[in-house]
Image: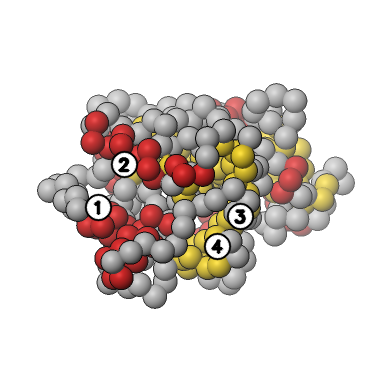
Amino acid sequence: MKLASLRTGNRDGALVVVSSDLSRAVSAASVAATMQAAIDDWTCVRPRLQALSDQLNEGTPPESFALATDMLAAPLPRAYQFLDGSAYPAHMRAVRKARGAAMPSDFETIPLLYQGNSDRFLAAREPIRFREDEALGIDYEAEVVVITDTVPQGTDPEAAREHVILLGLMNDTSLRYIIASEIPRGFGFMQGKPFRTLGPVFVTPDEVGSAWDGRWLAGTFISEVRGAMIGSLDPAEGASFGYHQLIAHAARTRDLSAGSIVGLGALAAPEGDRSRGCGCLAELRAHEQLERGEATTPFLRFGDEIRLEMFDGAGRSIFGAIEQRIERI
């Protein structure tokens, strides 16, 4: 099942069920007004949403309509919580080595996780706009995220698998030169992580079949910048921790609210494999610095465009594409 939020006059949009091929949609107003409302009552509303999905994919609901990405807000325009990790060692080692920083001594045993802003997520084709100039080191980060139901305090990793109810696509915009000044202060990201964009739709785990194993989502995640391929990565390869482990880590001392969004951080290929590229420009520039003594690929500039999309084993788009332009306000 695929779900999205139509743009409306309110902040949370209107929930719709989307066909598997992303071409059509039907209103879910009779079941739940918004994505968060559906998540809050997931056990009760999921069968009714699934019935709408089945009818839509069979071509039977007369009230369905042709869907275009521009009609959509972010699937969850604002969330109670966003938790992001850094679970791909190849990314961490490269960027830290390039700036002369050591890896955390417990990186392989304890997940890195921080709480980021979640008051507003950009839509898949919404431009990324800045008042300041482009010298901030504007970057994208290709990510797959999961959305949970209520996760009780003390949930272990195995049980955490059952608390993932939806999967999504994300661009985690990063300002690298601001981040470089924030990290040494030891109190987390603030100005360096200004925008997060969600792909057009969320999908339920059963929609992707065996590609989802409760830990990672397998497939091919493509990222393009200025029309050039930067990465063609499989999110199920190269990570030291899975979503189930990050969810359990976050729930060690507290409950997680229904609608919590959890990410593994910027994608990266398995260590030692440079053939598949990178999930962000910071890692690409780090490799250039380490291999050639100079980073030559520029960060994003005003007018640049990015495209992020993930495909299943049959080459079908899972979430639709994030297509954004960097603009000055």
Q: Residue at x 51, y 52 (%)?
A: 300
Residue lying furthest left: 105
**Sequence-first disc among 1 and 3:** 1
Distance between mark 1 and mark 3 Cα atoms: 27 Å
Q: Secondary structure at mark 3?
A: strand
Q: Amino acid at mark 3?
A: Glu
The residue located at (38%, 55%) in the rendering is 282
Of tags 1 and 3, the one toward the viewer is 1
Q: On the image, numbered disc 2 is attached to which residue? A: 180
Above or below, 71 against 82 in this view is below
Q: Residue at x 22, y 57 (%)?
A: 97
In the drawing, does residue 197 fall left or right of residue 236? Answer: right
Q: Which residue is mark 1?
A: 99
The residue that mark 4 highlights is 224
Q: Position of residue 284 (x, y in %)?
A: 39, 62
> Label 2 near label 1: C-beta < 8 Å?
yes
* Residue 265 spot, x, y in % from top left: 38, 48
Residue to which mark 3 is pinned: 305
